[in-house]
Each structure stands twice: as C-alpha cells, then as structure tokens.
Amino acid sequence: MIHIRIPATSANMGPGFDCIGVALELYNHLWVEEMPEGLTIDVKRKQEIEIPTDESNLIYQTMKYFYDQKGLAMPGVHLIQEDYIPMVRGLGSSAACIVGGLIAANELAGRPCDKEELAQMAAKLEGHPDNSNPAIFGSMVVGAQNEDKMMHVRLALPEDLVFATMVPSFPVSTAKARGVLPDGYSRGEVVFNVSRGALLVASIMSGKLENLSMAMEDKIHQPYRSQLIPNMEQIFEQAKGHGALACYLSGAGSTLMAMVKKELAEQFQKEMSCYLQTLPDHWELTLLKADLEGAKVKTE
C-alpha cells in the first residue's frame, strides 16, 4: 500500500489572510491501494464529525477530480484514513484531505505531476493557497493566486520558534467565520495589514523574532471573528504576559496560536495550561514544531 503523511497547517497568519500559512508536526495518515473496481474506505480513528465512507468522502472526491483533469479512468480504490488533525478547528483538516487525495491519485497514476502541479490543483480546489501550500512544501509558505495561476515562496523558519496550539472543544465553520467579515475595508485598514504582512515576511526571513509582536497584528479578519471565540482577547493577553512573541487566530478558528521561543516553551505551556483550565470550553494546549518536509509518501 501507499502511505501518505500530511501535516496540519495553520493559515491566515496574523495579517496574512488567505495567503500565509505554516505546516505543523501533527499529522493525518492515508493509505491507498488500487482495486479492480469499487470503493472501500476504512476509518481507523473516529472524530466528532463522522467521516463519509462513500463517494462523498473528500479524499475520494479529490482523487476523482485529479483523474478527470488528467483524462484518466478512475480505478477502484481502497482507502484507510487515520486522522489526528482535529476537524473544524482551523488546522487545515480539509486541506490535508485535498492534498492527500491529490498525492494518492498521482501515485496510483504513475506520478504524472510534480509537486508544483499538485500545489496548483490544491489551491484551485481550496480557493486559497495558505493551507495547501505548507501541507505540500512544509515550513511557512506565502502564496498568491489569480484565475490562472498560483505563485508561492517557501520561507525557512528560525529553529527556535515553537507554536503553542490552543484548541477548544467547540468548532467554528469556515462559512460562519467568513460570514462575519465586512464587505469592504478603509484605506487605513488595508495599509495597516499590508505593512504588517511585509514586516512579517521580512522578520521571518531575517530571524528578527522580536518584530513579531507588531508583524502579527491584523485588522482584516481577527477583530470580526473574535466574536465567535469566547475569551480570545483575554487569552492573547495572558499568552503575551507569559512570554509569547505573538498570538493569532489559526485559520477560521476555533484554534488560537501563540508563537513562543523554544527556551520558554515548556514554562509557557505549564503557565498557560493552568490559566486555560479556569475557562469554559475545555481548552487543550499542545506545543508543536513547524513541519519542514510537507506531505511524505512511502510504499509499505
């Protein structure tokens, strides 16, 4: 069988709405093999949202899209899913399915596409590249797209940067999170985000992590989505008080993220976990390093 490991991703990083994301060392696993006909899907690890085991399964739908795009007949397939990325929490679970499905189809079809072609397909299917790019290439990736093409740059992350992932018990759907955004923004708000986005990329590239406190500021999505995340601003305040370089809403939520220096990470985890236990919604804090490889394939 072909085994594909796909990382979680944290997108909409601060000012980088729909364009900047990072891969994390938390993974979904997918095994796939060709069959003479039909479809069998085994789910090895249940989540709170039931994963379809018929043709409506997102991985299968993505594989079918790949075969249709290449003008190939879709074979029978056996899929096994083992998912550790929490669903509807802003950690790229949908992108992981899309990337996994594209890679699975590409492997079964004899690898007609390279990573770049797969990334173009994934961005088109997702509608934005900030989850799919880091899921494919690893590390932190900046991307932009138009109707015809997506362009991207992979950034090397400083080795002493750790991501403290704070996941609550409640989900936030992407549709709901987009629904609270305004139809337009003032010139001042746009300039605010453009300047922070440029500073974020430059600071990561130069290793100037002290800039992140300003570089991760945002006026495009987080101020509006905070109404969907009880205690978000208080959690950010506490995290910064305990040494976080910056905090942001991961994806559409509900996960909150703190960027912490490696030498402070364990103490940060201890202190913030104690604080989170005083809040409702059963927050869980996990320290994650950035995944630097992206999706990996091996034959078993």
Image: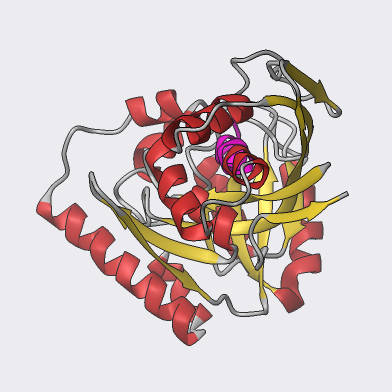
Quarter of the image for residue 69 reads top left
The answer to whether 66 appears left or right of 82 in the picture is left
Q: Position of residue 297 (x, y in %)?
A: 73, 54
Which residue is more in the foreground, 23 or 120? 120
49 left or right, relative to 230: right
> Going 53% across and 58% down the picture, which residue do you hit?
115
92 in the magenta segment: yes
The span shown in magenta is 88-100
**Residue 257: percent from left, percent from top:** 59, 53
Place of residue 62 in the rendered image (x, y in percent of width and height, measured from the top left): 54, 31
Q: Is residue 186 visible to us here?
A: yes
Judging depth in this view, the residue of 51 and 260 nearest the camera is: 51
The percent coordinates of residue 153 (x first, y second) are: 41, 69
Who's the residue at 41% across and 50% down the image?
A: 120
Q: Is residue 241 positioned above or below 248 on the image?
A: below
- Considering the image in quadrants, where does the N terminus appear? top right
Which residue is at the front of the view, 211 or 296?
296
Residue nearest the viewer, comparing 240 with 80:
80
Is residue 29 rendered to the left or right of residue 170? Answer: right
Farthest left residue?
187
Quarter-of-image position of residue 264: bottom right
Question: At 71% from the left edge and 15% from the top edge, which residue is drawn?
Answer: 38
Q: Is residue 212 above or below residue 187?
A: below
Is residue 240 highlighted in magenta? no
Residue 272 visible to an observer of this rendering: no
Instruction: Name the magenta segment's main secondary structure.
Output: helix
- From this view, report whether residue 300 is shown above or below residue 287: above
Residue at the image position 59 percent from the left and 15 percent from the top:
56
